[in-house]
């Protein structure tokens, strides 16, 4: 292993407009459906990775997340993939922090594993291209494949058994169509069921799962057209549709996955009410109780104000579209 032994990377979270839920390969973490997302400037992970010469892998790996020594087989698994590629057996110290809630439906696994893929591969002396990074990040978390890129991003489910065609690509630069996202936080704690476990349950038990997979390509095509046409009404309608379709899948899983709380429903109501008043704003919700409202930048302050006044909303955060994963000075 030549060259540098440490690197620091920053990656931003993303929110899917057309959702990923369900895998076709659990070991390689290959999604059963494609997805389309936007990368969020305001929610970021910073990850520092240092390989330690002359120390064996795994026994000496350390992962510090938000200041706490954390056990994570997935982080170790990603480090193993990097070591294998770089031809090294050195142990690593990984230090990461999220500037937003971890494991609470704001896609910390997305920014977390995108930042780790870039920092670890760079620290190991590999110079992976963006597609290789996206595939590597996917092994940590499916949504992380998208956070390698900024702006509007599409993740392909691919059809190969080895996952070599299951990667994300940018479809539109954020500069070409700025959008705002207001995040309404309705609970601060971590979700009871992780996305990984939840989607395994949906695939195994929801009678809607085959329909979810069968109708996915159609929704992706419609969303691509809405993004190409900068059509906010179309993008918003499809985003709400994909979100509610996802939650229908969750609700029909056994045991049921109910990620919403009263504040989630009230915030959806606020968005619908604003729309009835003529404001072009649309909601989406991931595997958690937080609501993200999409709108034009000129309407973001008004939307944030209305959501902040909604019962059950604890806090709001405003975000523009963000850039992809990048190296930063340590
Ligand atoms: P989320 O909605 O936050 O993505 P998930 O259930 O998908 O929730 O994933 C949460 C898991 O992601 C955490 O338990 C942790 O293992 C992992 N994770 C979160 N942040 C990071 C990080 N910065 N680096 C590595 N892994 C992380
Ligand atoms: C509801 O990417 O967190 O946010 O691949 O098992 O780590 P793993 O799951 P993850 O799932 C994200 C699910 C979602 C929708 C989405 O982001 O597309
Ligand atoms: Co996640």
Image (spheres, grey):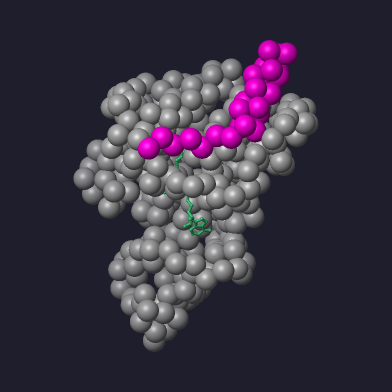
Does the magenta portion include 137?
A: no
User: Would residue 90 be found to the left or right of residue 4 on screen?
Assistant: left
Q: Which residue is drawn at 43% across and 30% down?
A: 251
Q: In which quarter of the image is the C terminus?
A: bottom right
Q: Nearer the viewer, residue 139 or 64?
A: 64
Number of residue marks: 0
At which x and y percent is residue 292?
Answer: 61, 34
Does the magenta portion include 261?
A: yes
Q: Quadrant of the N terminus?
A: bottom left
Say which quarter of the image contains residue 184. Answer: top right
Say which quarter of the image contains residue 92. Answer: bottom left
Q: Nearer the viewer, residue 96 or 264?
A: 264
Say which quarter of the image contains residue 76. Answer: bottom left
Q: Residue at x 68, y 13 (%)?
A: 276
Which range of residues does the magenta coloring cover?
Answer: 255-280
At which x and y percent is residue 96?
Answer: 55, 64
Q: Can residue 148 be seen here?
A: no
Q: Which of 254 and 278 is in front in this view?
A: 254
Q: Which residue is drawn at 42% across and 71% down?
A: 124
At which x and y percent is residue 30?
Answer: 31, 45
């Amino acid at each position: 292993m030549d060259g540098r032994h440490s690197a620091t990377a920053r990656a931003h979270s993303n929110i899917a407009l057309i959702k990923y839920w369900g895998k076709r390969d659990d070991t390689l973490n290959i999604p059963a459906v494609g997805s389309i997302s936007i990368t969020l400037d305001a929610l970021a992970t910073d990850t520092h990775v240092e390989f330690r010469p002359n120390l064996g892998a795994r026994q000496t790996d350390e992962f510090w997340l938000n200041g706490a020594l954390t056990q994570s087989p997935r982080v170790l698994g990603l480090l193993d993939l990097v070591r294998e590629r770089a031809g090294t057996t050195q142990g690593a110290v990984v230090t990461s922090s999220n500037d937003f809630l971890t494991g609470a439906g704001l896609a910390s696994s997305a920014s977390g594993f995108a930042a780790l893929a870039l920092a670890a591969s760079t620290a190991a002396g590999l110079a992976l291209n963006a597609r290789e990074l996206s595939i590597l990040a996917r092994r940590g978390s499916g949504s992380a494949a998208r956070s390698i890129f900024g702006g509007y991003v599409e993740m392909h489910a691919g059809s190969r058994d080895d996952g070599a065609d299951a990667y994300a690509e940018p479809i539109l630069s954020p500069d070409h169509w700025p959008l705002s996202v207001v995040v309404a936080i309705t609970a601060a704690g971590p979700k009871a069921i992780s996305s990984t476990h939840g989607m395994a349950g949906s695939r195994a038990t929801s009678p809607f799962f085959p329909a979810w997979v069968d109708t996915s390509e159609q929704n992706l095509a419609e969303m691509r057209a809405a993004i190409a046409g900068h059509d906010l009404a179309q993008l918003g309608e499809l985003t709400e549709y994909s979100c509610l379709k996802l939650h229908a899948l969750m609700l029909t899983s056994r045991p049921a996955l109910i990620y919403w709380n009263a504040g989630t429903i009230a915030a959806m109501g606020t968005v619908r009410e604003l729309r009835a008043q003529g404001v072009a704003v649309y909601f989406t919700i991931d595997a958690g109780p937080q609501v993200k409202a999409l709108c034009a930048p000129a309407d973001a302050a008004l939307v944030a104000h209305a959501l902040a006044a909604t019962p059950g909303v604890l806090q709001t955060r405003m975000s523009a579209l963000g850039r992809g994963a990048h190296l930063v000075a340590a």
